[in-house]
Structures are given as structure tokens and as C-alpha cells.
Amino acid sequence: MDGEQIEFAAEWSAQALRHMAENGIPPCPENYAVWFRYASGRTPELNKEIDARIARQEPVNMDATAELRERFMDDGKLTDVTLNTGARLNTEVDRILKIIEETAGNSSTFGQSVRNASEALTNQSTPNDVAHAVEAIIAASRKMEERSAELEETLQATKSELNEMQQSLEKAHSEARTDGLTGVNNRKAFDEALVREMAAAGANGNPLCLVIGDIDHFKKFNDTFGHRTGDQVLKLVANCLKTGALSQHFVARYGGEEFAVIMPATEIELAESVANKIRETVQARELVKRSTGESLGRVTMSMGISLYRPGETGAGLIERADGCLYAAKHAGRNCVITEMHETTVPQAKAS
């Protein structure tokens, strides 16, 4: 690193620490990495997202920083697995090539042995000469068989290795797109799925709905009962979403206490019905503190639903679902609002 690079790095570091101090974010290595990257401008998508949040006057706190790190920077594990798999694959290929080369060499030697034995036989050859020639051919054949058997054994072992490598890569790919706390898809997987499903809906003309839901008064709940209980609430809601969504639906943790469900081939009336059933299931779960048996009350959710319009961007679809969610919050929470229908409000509203 030359003097100019050191100067830039020092400036970026100072900016990162200042941003963290302004937003009340502890300067641990994980958080620092996000804000140093922001200050450097080396990840335009990260900067665009942070600038948009600041423009909307949304807090960029520890939770938001963790989400940003997962979306834009948390690919190290997958990269490590890929590199390790590549190294293992190269080793296996080298083994196979070596045996093939040796087998090819043995094939040449075998052919030469047969030719030599054949050429050694003449009209004057004795039975003893013929016996020696046969022994030479048999010996060469056995050596070829041994090498062929070794090659076959190596190929079988390599096939097993390749299957294991594939499973390892698939697992790493899945983990890189799974929310570590709740076990549902994470924001990165959501972004990919939304692009994919919008393209499919545009091509086949099927309806596509997006549901964005938010746990009501989650911050107050967290502050009252602690983050460990808050984590259990997030897991409960994620489980209700997974069990309540239809088989073709895609459930993801959108960020913090927000969840999203991408609903391909789903009319908005059906999307509303499914969302309400999920909301009712969440509300029906009474939380009890295991250590004391104390009731912690019930959790409720507000949800907004938008319907994909051919040719629109993902940002537009999300923005309209967010708008419906915002309306649901102002309608008293614990309800579902769609673009097409009147608010569906239960008789017992959340406080």
C-alpha cells in the first residue's frame, strides 16, 4: 500500500467511525467493516441503500447494519467453501489424470511386450520358447488389469468425492440465503426470488402478489421482555408464515421485525385470505415465560399487499406493499390492507 492509499484508508476509517458514532453503533469489527466499505464507496449498492435510508430518515442502527452486512458483504463463507471445493476437485482430477497417463503408458508397454513375444517366435521356436512368450503376455496382461482396476477404483472414489463436494456447495449456498435466527429465507434470497418471480409473471401472465408484514409494537416488546424473548417472537412469527403460506409461496425475513411473502400464481383475493389466516394464527399464540409461567401477552401483525403490474420494477412493487402496510398500521394495527379492497380489521384490535 503506497502513501496515497494509506492516506485514503485513514480518511475512510475516520469517516466510518464518525458515521458509527452518529448512529450509536458500537465499533466492533463486523460493524466497522460495513461502514468502512460505505466510506470507501467500493460497493455502490451498499451506499445507495444507506443513502436511501438516511433520506427517508430511517435509523441505521445495529440491526440495520447487520442486515446490510448480510445483504451486501456476507458472502465469505460461501466463497471459502467454493475455494476449498475447487482445491479438492483439482486434487481429484490430478489423481485421475496421473493414473490415465500411467495406464496409457502401460498400454504401450503391453503392446510392445506382445509384439516382442510374437516376434521372438519363429518356425524354429521350441515349446519352451512359446511358453516364455505366453508367460510374458500373461504378465503384461495382469499388469494392465491391475492398473485398470486401480483406475476404476479411483474413479468410483472420485465420484463419491464429487457428490460430497456438490452437497457441500449446495449447503453453503442455502446457508448464505437463510436467515440465521428464524430459518426462513433472508433478504438476499428475497431480492433474487422477487426478480425471478416478476420475470416469470411477466412471461406467463399469471398474477403475482407481494405481502409485507410487520410485528406490531415489536420494539416495545423487546424493551420490556428482552432481546432473547424478542428472538423467540421472531421465530414464532416465521414459523406461522412458513406453515400458513401456500406451497408455491416464498417466505423471507425482510429485515428486523419485517417479513415478506412472494406469492406467485396468486390472485389478490387469495393473497388477502392467506395473509389473514397467518395473522390470526400469530394472534392466537399466547406467549408464556417458561421459567415462571408468566403470560407475556399475544403478538399481532400488520400486513400490506400489492399486486404486480407488468413492466414495473421490484422497487415499485415493494413501495406499494409498504404503503399498504403503513395504512394498516394507521388503521389500528393487527389487520391486512390490499391495494384492491377495503381494510380487513378484526374485532379485537391491538393496543
Image: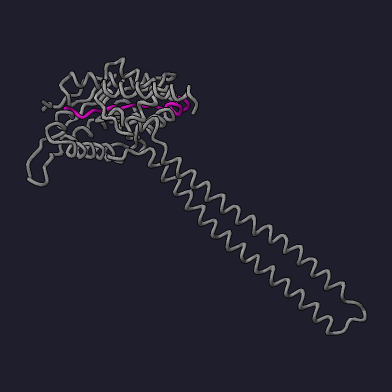
Considering every residue shown, the one lying at the far top of the view is: 55
Please state the horizontal and vertical placement of residue 115, each as a whole percent of the image: 83, 69
Is residue 265 visible in this depiction of the protein? no
Kindly identify the residue that appears in the image at 12 percent across and 27 percent down. Answer: 350
Residue span colored magenta: 198-217
Please tell me in which quadrant of the rendered image residue 138 appears: bottom right
Along the line of sight, which residue is nearer the eye, 138 or 250?
A: 138
Above or below, 324 against 178 in this view is above
Q: Is residue 30 magenta?
A: no
Q: Going by the image, does 300 lie left or right of 191?
A: left
Kindly identify the residue that appears in the image at 52 percent across and 51 percent down. Answer: 88
Number of marks present in the image shown: 0
Kindly identify the residue that appears in the image at 55 percent across and 60 percent down. Answer: 156
Is residue 338 visible in this depiction of the protein? yes
Along the line of sight, which residue is nearer the eye, 158 or 2?
A: 2
Q: Going by the image, does 11 lie left or right of 64?
A: right
Kindly identify the residue that appears in the image at 76 percent across and 67 percent down. Answer: 110
Along the line of sight, which residue is nearer the eye, 134 or 19?
A: 19
Q: Is residue 213 magenta?
A: yes
Please tell me in which quadrant of the rendered image residue 252 appears: top left
Considering every residue shown, the one lying at the far front of the view is: 3
Above or below, 80 against 347 in this view is below
Please state the horizontal and vertical placement of residue 348, each as a whole percent of the image: 10, 28
Please state the horizontal and vertical placement of residue 152, each as a whole percent of the image: 60, 62
Please tell me in which quadrant of the rendered image residue 197 appears: top left
Please state the horizontal and vertical placement of residue 342, each as a whole percent of the image: 22, 19
